[in-house]
Amino acid sequence: MSITVGATLPEATVLQLGAGGRPEEVQIADKFKDRKVVLFGLPGAYTGTCTSAHVPSFIAAMDDLKAKGVDEVICVSVNDPFVMNAWAESTGAAAAGITMLADAGAEFTKALGLAFTAPPAGFYDRSQRYALAAEDGVVTVFHPEESPGTCDHSGGASMVAAL
């Protein structure tokens, strides 16, 4: 069963590339405590829809999300922090202010109930495509994508409209 509106986000440790190019642990609970945060998850850095549609949709929506009182926009994927950092630079997500977090062992993704495996694509324990908003760690909006390879419900404009 996946996360739902009204549920509290699970405790989990993810990674980001810190100063000096070293991985640093990030506690999900700390990112959401006393804050309004939008988080979107996707199957993988540098993959088709993720790179051409999902991340760009949030880059385009950043000003509108901030105007809605969002403190931070986070992208999480089952990748390592080095890949997430390089992808943030190559897509413009870093310049736009999107925080890129690596769920390297899929701990957070599995706790959300949003992991999937697709061997033909080489995907094992990857994240389904979704977006959510949470206030103080409680989910207020949850938009899972219904069809693989699409970014309709989980895109930046949909999140702006829901807030």
Image (cartoon, rainbow, N blue to C red):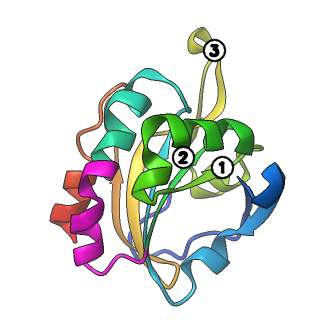
Q: Choose between 129 and 58: the one closer to the eye.
A: 58
| Residue numbers of the magenta segment | 59-71
At x 52% / y 26%, what residue is drawn?
Answer: 46
**Left or right: where 105 falls relative to 99:** right
Residue 110 badge = 1
Q: Which residue is mark 2?
A: 114
**The C terminus sits in image quarter:** bottom left
Q: Residue furthest left?
A: 161
Where disc 1 sits, the SS reads helix
Q: What kind of residue is marked 1?
A: Lys
Expressed as whole percent of the image width and height from the top left, the position of residue 25 reads 80, 63
Residue 119 badge = 3
Where disc 2 sits, the SS reads loop
Expressed as whole percent of the image width and height from the top left, the position of residue 44 reads 56, 32
At x 73% / y 40%, what residue is drawn?
Answer: 82
Q: Are marks 3 and 2 in contact (CB under 8 Å)?
A: no
